[in-house]
Image (tube, grey):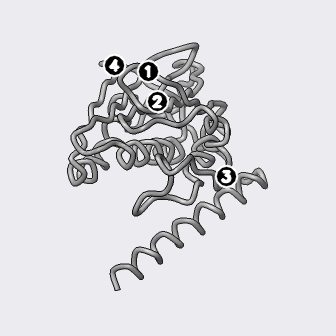
Amino acid sequence: MHTLQEEVRHMSDMVEKLLTLARLDAGELRPARQRLDVTDFVEEATARWLATADARAVHVDVDTPESGSVLADPALTRRILDNLVDNAIRHTPPGGRVRVSASLQDGGWLLSVSDQGPGVPAEQRVRVFERFARADSARGRVAEGGAGLGLPLSVAFAGVQGGEVRLSEAAGWGAVFTVWLPDPGPDDEGERVSS
């Protein structure tokens, strides 16, 4: 019964992602931007994954500035972070670390999620952002892994906000996924701040 429930959950999640991709392809998904406190938003989004990380004996570090805000769609941006943090925790071995950080860069905000997993092989670095693509068995679907839709959705959610998702490397880390979101600055007096 437990196995069937997990399969139903997985299939429901995949159908929901496919419907979202269809909306994106049809141009029906419009971002509802709000001014978000970056520190509060990143800490809240990451906190939702702490129980999962604890269950896997993975330590999560959050590094955010003391202040700052970004004009972004909270639901879409939260889903980007959910996808990236979930992947990072799943691919980090017990005793390893995941790091989530935020910093100003190039006229916008850079949200970064780093893991201590095996990384993404060089030959898979472009393909990893394609729909239904999964890297080799090192970063393929683990016990409750995905269908290869999380990263394409993250790319699309960033794209409709004028941003992008990148994959890079850093010493001591397996994979580093960064989300860059443009920010026009605090000129939007009509925008409300949310966390």
- Which labelled disc corresponds to residue 20? none
Q: CA distance from mark 4 to mark 1?
A: 20 Å
Between disc 4 and disc 1, whose residue precedes?
4
Q: Residue at x 49, y 24 (%)?
A: 169
Point 41% across, 63% down: residue: 144
Residue 138 is situated, as x and y percent measured from the top left of the image, at: 46, 46
Of the residues under marks 1 and 3, which one precedes in the sequence? 3
Q: CA distance from mark 1 to mark 3?
A: 25 Å
N-terminal-most mark, 2 or 4? 4
Instruction: Give, as a three-letter code, the residue at label 2.
Output: Val
* Secondary structure found at label 4: loop
Task: Give the number of the mark in front: 4 or 1.
Answer: 1
Mark 4 closeness class: few <14, some 14–19, many ≥20 residues within 10 Å = few
Residue designated by label 3? 131
Q: In the drawing, what numbered circle is on residue 176? A: 2
Q: Please report contact status of discs 1 and 2: CB closer than 8 Å, yes or no.
A: yes
Amino acid type at circle 4 is Pro
Locate the C terminus by quadrant.
top left
**Residue wearing tag 4:** 65
In which quadrant will I find the N terminus?
bottom left
Whichever of labels 1 and 2 marks the residue nearer the N terminus, that label is 1
Q: Is residue 5 above or below residue 185?
A: below
95 or 161: nearer the eye?
A: 95
Q: Secondary structure at mark 1?
A: loop
96 and 166: which one is in front? 96
Where residue 139 appears, as percent x and y from the top left, is: 48, 47
Secondary structure beneath label 3: loop
When asked about the image quadrant of residue 145, the answer is: bottom left
Q: Which residue is mark 1?
A: 170
Residue that lies at the very extreme toward the right in this rendered image = 26
> Foreground mark, 2 or 4?
2
